[in-house]
Image (spheres, rainbow, N blue to C red):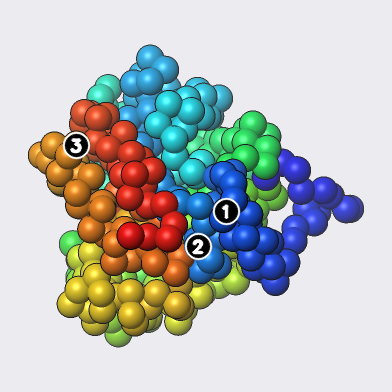
Amino acid sequence: MSVYPRMGGRLIRPSLGLMRAASGMFHLHARVGELLPLERVLCAVFHKEPDRVPVVHFLQGATRRLTGITYEQFSRDPEMTADAYLTANELFGSDVLYTVIDLSVEAADFGQEIVYPPYSTAHPNYHNPLISCVEDYGRLEVFDPRKTPRMGKSIELGRILCKKAGIRYPVVGFVFGPLGVLSMMRGAQRLFLDCLKHPEKVKAALEVITEVLIAYVRAQCDTGVDSVMLDTLFASQSGISREQWVEMEGVYVRRITDEIRRNGAMVTLHNCGTRPYLDLQLEYMQPLLVSLADLPDDCDSLQEMKRKYGQRVALAGLIPTQGIMVYSPREIMELAREQIRILAPGGGYVLAPACEYPPNADLANALAVVRAAELYGRYPIK
């Protein structure tokens, strides 16, 4: 939030204990009145029941259609991106603002060539990877993300959103995990093979990336964002083994999340992989909220996930992205209703798609997700 005061140039933020106490007050107020989105989300994060389940639509690139800008303008102009995000929240009713643009932001500033399709998400030029052989891992150098074309603009996006959100919306920054950033410059399959055959060369590159990402999250925190969300996609069966993830990313993301906490912001986590290693991610990153696309690898049902993890971390996501493409709004609402029934009691739940809303999908299903929270997510959950 832009309302945090500064002392000696540093933001003065409330402690976790103070925010936890505030969430208790918001919980009491929710019994008799409507909460602001920020209050609603804080209740969920600290496992208190708000007035209703908070909701995030993860529209991202789809928001450009609401303001008439091109996809490249959305990807590269923070003023236009902020306007699109704020318009989406006003029209659709999400409880969160976020700075995530796409997963190529960090790689672009390391020198990876990026393709900007006119109607879809920016991505690396897969035919021209920055790291074309194992010797290229040594090419990466540390730089200041505040002075770069894409990370610098993402930092500015956070500053704009914090200023315009005031105390109404929580603003969440975003950073792709170091292994994910490296995959954008090498290609995931080749990177996984290099982790087995040339681990020391990969680790040398990960050290450089981690140092840059630590500076990146520090700069995001300085804008006033309430949280920084870390994407650790490969901590799942979509990536590498549990043991390899600890060695090749877990030890690095621990340092990044420590920096987020050191700067007073909350740590949140996103993982859209298949069967994520949630227990390991909680151990190494200690997030307050985790957004998932699939059940953890040690759970067989939503009920088991709620029972095993529902008191340790707030849960979000799980509305399948592919379902948004093919389900009717009524089907999306029924799916959301079932998840609310299981995951929302006692707080600690945010209704959201599993990952980015498909950029060219019918926006009726975004409204359906929000409408489901309003209809079925009122506490106490029936």
Q: Position of residue 117 (x, y in %)?
A: 26, 27
Label located before the other in sequence (3 or 1): 1
Disc 2 packing (10 Å; few <14; some 14–19; many ≥20)? many
Instruction: Name the residue carrying label 2.
Output: 49
How far apart are the alpha carbons under marks 2 and 3?
A: 26 Å
- Position of 97 with respect to 156 (left or right) is left
Q: Position of residue 94 (x, y in %)?
A: 44, 40
Residue found at the very far left of the displayed protein: 326
Q: Examine the image and state in which quarter residue 134 appears.
A: bottom left
Question: For the point 56% across and 55% down, which residue is it?
Answer: 31
Question: For the point 24% across and 70% down, which residue is it?
Answer: 302
- Position of 74 with respect to 262 (left or right) is left
Look at the numbered disc 1 and give the secondary structure of its residue.
helix
Q: Which of the two residues, 146 or 366, is positioned nearer the viewer here? A: 366
Q: Amino acid at mark 3?
A: Pro
Residue 104 in sight: no
Looking at the image, is mark 2 or mark 3 nearer the viewer?
2
Residue 303 in sight: yes
Q: Position of residue 360 (x, y in %)?
A: 23, 29
* Disc sitting over residue 30 in the figure: 1
Question: For the point 21% across and 31% down, which residue is it?
Answer: 361
* Disc sitting over residue 115 in the figure: none
Look at the numbered disc 3 and give the secondary structure of its residue.
helix
* Disc sitting over residue 329 in the figure: 3
